[in-house]
Image (cartoon, grey):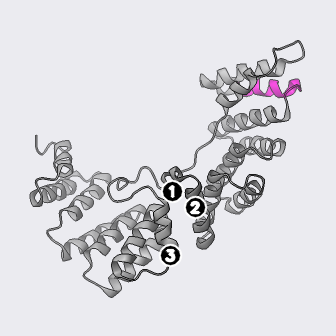
Amino acid sequence: MQFNKSITAAIFISLLSLPPLNAQANGIEYARAAQEAQEFGNRELAIKYYTDALDEGDLSAKHQAYVYNNIGILYQELSNAEEAESNFTNSVRLLPTYSDAYYNLSSLLSSQQRYEDALSLLIAAIIEIPEDAELILQRGIIYRELKEIEAALQDVSQAVLINPSLGSKLINQNNVYLGTYIETATIEHFITILSDEPASLDGYLNRAKSYLSSGFFDQALADTEYVIELEPKSFKAYEAKAIILYSQGAYDKSIRAFDNALHFAPNDPEIFYNRGYLYKSLGDNNNASFDFQMAFSINRSEKKYRKELKELGLIK
């Protein structure tokens, strides 16, 4: 869930605000031409013009940093990670408070699984820009990758506290359970996670769902398995476990967990519905159809069950 941050629009506005061109101010003109080429998808030409802009030597350090960041993005789009890294590095060197370049460089390093390098970069970045929620979130995600869970939770919860909309970045947007079972992580989720141990088994399941919504799958799974250990017939725990396992890519184990949930709650339409979603995501329309039909036969008033059957052409 990491994206490059281009500042082509920002540089265009910034450049327009500069004084009119003179004979010695050709760098700005080249940068404008580069932006236009970039907008039209001509990456090689955009790189050439951005390079020409830098070679002119008349851009301020700030605008040089913007240009290096854009060149880095272009090289990354061309799958040239070495040049992308070099340009992002130049960008943050010239403008140590430029969060977009830090974000892009840390994303590049993370994509190469160079988590320690990305972490060192972000620690330095957050010293320069201590209240940047997106950089704090990025650092938290890297701590999560490194299994430093306490530090990860501290960072991601702080980021969501500063900017609640960032909760959506913690979730794989392609997860079929997003919007049905998995919610966007909220401040309340972190209150649940960071508070004292739950006082009830339902409390553990609520915390498991909060962990799930925050992308902490191992911790979510541990809570559901704890509930199952104490209450082996808890169909809610098995259903939550199934969705967590799906989110981890453990599809066969997920199906078995759904099967266990249905063993203890054979008339629960939501379990059929959620298992149907899993089969549908795997391209198994036969099993998906069976599950959606079962959910609909148990509760014919639920519109979402009917919707799935209509999409599969089973009802009109």
- Badge 3 element: loop
**Is residue 91 shown left or right of residue 308?**
right
Question: What residue is disc 1 on?
Answer: 170
Residue farthest along the top direction in this orientation: 23
Amino acid at the residue labelled 1: Leu
Contact between marks 2 and 3 (CB within 8 A): the answer is no
Q: Going 68% across and 41% down the picture, which residue do you hit?
A: 80
Asked if residue 65 lies in the magenta stretch, the reply is: no
Q: Is residue 218 visible?
A: no
In screen coordinates, is 265 left or right of 82?
A: left
- Mark identifier at residue 156: 2
Which residue is at 18% across, 59% downward? 291
Residue under label 3? 195
**Viewer-side residue, 283 vs 169:** 169
Give the mark nearest the N terminus, 2 or 1: 2
Q: Looking at the picture, does residue 17 appear above or below residue 1?
A: above
- Tell me which amino acid carries mark 2: Val
